[in-house]
Image (tube, rainbow, N blue to C red):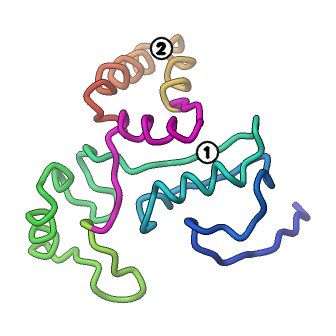
């Protein structure tokens, strides 16, 4: 599209930008991998202009199939047990540059992430729930998806 953007390599917890520099920030599939998620959210808040928009994804602590190890139920296990199960199944990330263990990652219950983000002043919107609500009028499958999402959300099971 002819857009040229500089590439900057930095830790998310210490962004090399001035305060209120950006009108939009995208943090997709990053938060679970950083060392200090609270500091990362604080840095996003610092560099974001007031009234700006931010898109952040977080890993669901109660997802059935773990998105990193692709194992059913591993998120429900205590972390030491999960680590042994991952290794037993041969899914340990022990080679290459991706050596992060599940115990070192940060997954969230939905309500916990909302509380954490709101501490900084973010207004949290569940864009998936909004999309499902818009689509609920298009047919029985869409209505079923919307109801499932709404019913599971209080249990923090949505992805």
Could you tell me which quadrant the C terminus lies in? top left
Q: Is residue 12 left or right of residue 155?
A: right
Residue identifier under label 2: 139
Q: Residue at x 11, y 66 (%)?
A: 80
The numbered mark at residue 20 is none
Q: Position of residue 2 (x, y in %)?
A: 91, 64
Query: Residue 141 or 97: which is nearer the viewer?
Result: 97
Identify the mark nearer the N-term, 1 or 2.
1
Q: Does residue 106 appear to the left or right of 5 in the view shown?
A: left
Question: Residue 102's quadrant in the figure?
Answer: bottom left
Extreme-bottom residue of the structure: 96
Instruction: Identify which residue is drawn at 75% across, 39% down.
Output: 50
Q: Is residue 96 above or below residue 6?
A: below
**Seen in the image, is 94 located left or right of residue 7?**
left
Residue 124 location (% of width, % of height): 54, 32
First to last magenta residue range: 104-127
Q: Position of residue 72 (x, y in %)?
A: 18, 53
Please state the total of marks drawn on the protein image.
2
The reply to whether discs 1 and 2 touch (Cβ–Cβ < 8 Å) is no
Q: Position of residue 158 (x, y in %)?
A: 34, 35
Seen at 34% across and 46% down, the residue is: 108
- The kind of secondary structure element at disc 1 is strand
Residue situated in front as seen by the camera: 60 or 50: 50
* Helix, strand or loop under label 2: loop
Queried whether the magenta region covers residue 125, the answer comes back as yes
Res. 55 mark: 1
| Whether residue 19 is situated above or below residue 98 in the rendered picture | above
Bin the neighbour count of mark 1 within 10 Å (Cα to Cα): few under 14, some 14-19, many 20 and up.
few
Give the class, few, some or many, for how many residues have Cα within 10 Å of label 2's Cα (few <14, many ≥20).
Answer: few
Foreground mark, 1 or 2, reads 1
Q: Residue at x 42, y 86 (%)?
A: 97
């Amino acid at each position: 599209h002819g857009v040229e953007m500089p590439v900057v390599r930095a830790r998310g917890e210490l962004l090399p930008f001035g305060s209120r520099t950006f009108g939009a920030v995208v943090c997709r599939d990053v938060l679970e991998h950083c060392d200090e998620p609270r500091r990362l959210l604080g840095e996003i808040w610092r560099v974001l202009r007031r009234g700006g928009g931010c898109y952040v994804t977080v890993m669901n602590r109660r997802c059935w199939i773990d998105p990193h190890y692709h194992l059913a139920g591993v998120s429900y296990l205590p972390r030491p047990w999960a680590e042994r199960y991952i290794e037993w199944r041969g899914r340990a990330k022990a080679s290459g540059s991706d050596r992060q263990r599940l115990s070192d990652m940060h997954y969230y219950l939905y309500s916990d992430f909302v509380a954490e983000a709101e501490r900084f002043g973010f207004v949290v919107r569940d864009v998936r729930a909004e999309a499902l609500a818009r689509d609920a009028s298009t047919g029985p499958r869409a209505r079923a998806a919307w109801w499932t999402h709404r019913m599971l959300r209080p249990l923090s099971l949505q992805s």
